[in-house]
Image (spheres, coloured by chain):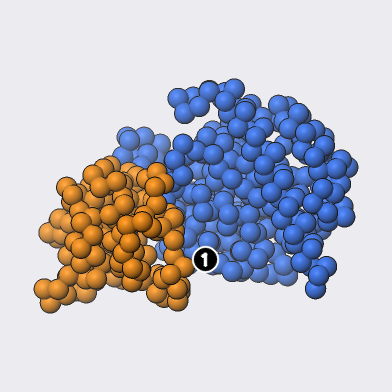
Chain colours: A blue, B orange
Amino acid sequence: MYAFESYHRAQSLTEAVELLAANPFARPMAGGTDILVRLREGHKDYAKIVDIHGLPELEGITEDRGELRIGSGTTFAVLMASPLAARLAPVLIEAAGWVAGPQIRNTATIGGNICNGSACADSAAPLLILNAHLDLIGPEGKRMIPLRGFHLGPGRVELRQGEILRSVRVKPEPGQGQGLGTAYVKYSMRQAMDIATIGCGAGVRLRDGRPDGIVDELRLAFTVAAPTPVRCPSAEAAAMGLPLNEAIQAAVAALEQDVSPRTSWRAAGDFRMHIIRTLAGRMIRTAAERFAMHVAKHVAK
Amino acid sequence: MLTISCSINDRPYELTIDPRASLLDMLRDQGLTSVKQGCGMGECGACTVLVDDVAVNACLYLATWVHGKRIRTVEGEVKNGQLSPVQQAYVDAGAVQCGFCTPGLIMTTTAFVEACRDKFRNPEDITPEDIRRAHAGNLCRCTGYDTIVQAVRQSLGQPASAQDLTKSSPP
């Protein structure tokens, strides 16, 4: 038995918002793969539950004029099987494959992964690379905010009282989607059921489409490299306008200004910094190769 | 208390359950003791059952969530006294030692084999690495996994051959 102090099953999104607004200490629960574990560990913070599991209004992956809309209740397994997501946000699919294990991916939702405020959320780095937006609904109405800035600290996010994440949006923009080579990798001791030691996502656009061309745009994001998932403005700026090899060197050299890895039982801070630098180089190169490959295929047609 | 209806191993059930109960609690209360509690936090997969043919950890799933759904446990895989092909493959490959992880693994394999078939995946294209990845949510502390991979290969209709077994580390 889970030690709920209060439990309400919402029958609709409107009811869920009302229930959350009326119960200031209640938390929404969708997949439950984090909350139920914490409850079992005896965390009182998770004892009041508004159950939003399987609400139809939070499901579905759709496209509207090039914008990808992923319902927050979408499980990672459903996301990974979506041809639409694979076309519009391949780096998100790549990262979803690193989440926990198959059973957890069958239950855990992308909304929970973002909203629980974890610094190691596997979906956060790819979504930061894609400049994703969050579609929120609360007692005061709807709002759309960027994911960048949503994470405030460990376990803390920019959600107002009663607010629920309805969907994650990846908007079409110049240089994104097919115009940006992307890559994500997670470093962890085991390849399954382990929390990231470091997760790294990169997005690259090259001026002339050659694998060693000038970097016109770099986007770099990490999980577990700071108290929240982060983008790396210093490294991104340092790489601009340089040929790929020099761009990688410059980005890696500037990285220290963007991240602040901590020491924990899982890994020492300086080891994490080493992993951050190594993965940054590898992911920028992989993203650049994919961009060049895409251009080559496109030109060949 | 909430009343739900669901099907368990193809039999209809109407149950009155505490909303705090996990699916694992509920199934064991119904006498389905193949559903094992190992870690109780979604790490080991010993409690794996299928909900609408999708593998989930019953320990991290509320019993109320199965309202209107179809649950399968290893007990229901035996039809007319005959083991399912997956169960038989585990026996043939000797993929069982202490047996605690076996019901969960068999359900994971069952979902994997059925999904491969539904997606018309050519069994010959499925590598031992794919098998290991698909079973990464189930821990076995006895077998070293090679015999389990062998059982899955047999379930997929792949020829059994010891030399194909990977030497890679456990999933």
Q: On the image, numbered disc 1 is attached to which residue?
A: A81
Residue at x-position 44% and y-position 61%: B127
Q: Is residue B62 left or right of residue A245?
A: left
Query: Which quarter of the picture shows residue B84?
Result: bottom left
Residue at x-position 33% and y-position 35%: A41
Residue B120 visible within the image:
yes
Q: Secondary structure at mark 1?
A: loop
Query: Which quarter of the picture shows residue B93?
Result: bottom left
Q: Position of residue A273 (x, y in %)?
A: 62, 27
Q: Quadrant of the C terminus of chain A?
A: bottom right
Residue at x-position 72% and y-position 45%: A285
Q: Is residue A163 left or right of residue B167?
A: right
Residue at x-position 80% and y-position 33%: A250
Front-most of B119 and B26?
Answer: B119
Q: Examine the rendered structure and indicate whether residue A188 appears above or below residue B22.
A: above
Query: Which quarter of the picture shows residue B107?
Result: bottom left
Q: Position of residue A157 (x, y in %)?
A: 57, 40
Task: Rate crowding at label 1 as few (under 14), some (14 to 19) or many (20 or more) other CA atoms within 10 Å.
Answer: few
Q: Chain of mark 1?
A: A
Q: Amino acid at mark 1?
A: Ala
Residue A115 visible within the image:
no
Front-most of B101 and B164?
Answer: B164
Front-most of B91 and B133?
Answer: B91
Q: Examine the rendered structure and indicate whether residue B29 appears above or below residue B68.
A: above
Q: Examine the rendered structure and indicate whether residue A158 appears above or below residue A169.
A: above
Q: Position of residue A190 (x, y in %)?
A: 44, 40
Q: Position of residue B63 (x, y in %)?
A: 28, 58
